[in-house]
Image (tube, rainbow, N blue to C red):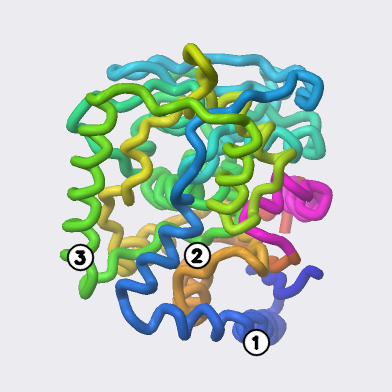
Amino acid sequence: MQTAISTNHTPKTRRTTHEINFLLSFKHFKQYNRMANESENKLLFRMHHIIPRGLASSFDIPDSEITLPPSPQDIEIQMTWGKVAAKAWGPVNGRPLIAIHGWLDNCGTFDTLIPLLPKDLRIIAVDIPGHGLSSHFPPDIAYNYVDTLLAVERMFERFQWKKCSFLVHSLGGATAMLYAGVFPEKVEKVICLDIIRATPTISATVGFRLRKTVGKLLKYEADIIAGPEEPISYESAVERWVSGTFGSLDEKACRILCQRGLKKLDGGYVFSRDRRLLAAPLAFIPKEDQLILARKTTADVLVIKFIDGPYFEDPEDYQEHMEALRTSSKCVRYVEIEGKHHTHLTHPETVAPIINDFLNYRSDSV
């Protein structure tokens, strides 16, 4: 099912109808909203979907069950603290597009979707620092998606781009939306999968959140110093991963992510990701600041919301942000389709046509 599509080039009266449809489409949100009446429950609900808990530490993957995607090139972008690993898809002189995955995933999350996208794209799908094959941050340096802005800017310098687009999932969308507002002249299009922006800082719960995160970070630091994680079997790992994402990932999707998400040790495999990522990111992004950046965004924006994925804000907040984007952007679309949080990986055929239509649309020709 596909609903609630809006663009800036439609007449004002029609856009008002879309706004009504947008709000009506959120009727299923009420069930989630009841869960979020208390701030602690809302935080816990958010963490369940973005940072899966109790994930397995290793995978023994049968080679016969791995289906490799069409031949992307592995590349590395050097940073002052290490490297950002990435996959480069498409012709070197193609239209530049940066693909950024969600929290605790890696760039393999786009392996099934990218082959269905236009062949003239030059896609650089990155492993966020601390994820996949990218280097971990040094000790005592915590992770947050604001730091990723610097990594993106270094990519511009490395590839000498003047402008690019973004394909982003979940918390990867937080980086892209912030970057599009800070550097509007450098961004052509933004495609956000199952997120609209970074979840705003809630003043009432900021003390609770910081206290809990600091405690978890200290715990994981101590665990890292104590030694590597204990390898376990492939079957147990997949079962924990699937349950840790509330069924958003299936076994096939897990195997794809494991190709970059594992490293081999004696006796099995462990996650390649930094264990400190299991704590909530330390980032403060108030709603008001994000609205200011949204109003400065000139890129065309497409938000694809998976109906059975997580909702982190009230429908009025979503609508407010979409309206802010329309201030300077000529094309802003919101589309809802059936699916869970990783639908772009498990069922890419439902997502690709919407993305392709958006990529082929030229707002400057209207």
Would residue 360 appear left or right of 152 to someone viewing this image? right
Q: Secondary structure at mark 1?
A: helix
Mark 3 in CB contact with mark 2 (< 8 angstroms): no
Residue under numbered circle 2:
325
Would residue 14 appear left or right of 332 to someone viewing this image? right
Q: How far across and how far down the image is residue 102, in percent?
A: 51, 45
User: Residue shown at 81%/21% (left/top)?
Assistant: 64
Q: Which residues lie in the magenta part?
A: 339-359
User: Residue shown at 69%/86% (left/top)?
Assistant: 17
Q: Specify the amino acid type for callout 2.
A: Leu
Report which quarter residue 274 is drawn in: top left
Report which quarter residue 289 is drawn in: bottom left
**Is residue 354 magenta-colored?**
yes
**Is residue 261 magenta-colored?**
no
Residue under numbered circle 3:
208
Q: Secondary structure of the magenta portion, mostly?
A: helix
Mark 3 in CB contact with mark 1 (< 8 angstroms): no
User: First in sequence: mark 3 or mark 2?
Assistant: 3
Which tag is nearer the camera, tag 3 or tag 1?
3
Q: Kindly tell me whether residue 126 is visible in this rendering.
A: no
What separation in Å lies between label 2 and label 1 (alpha carbons)?
20 Å
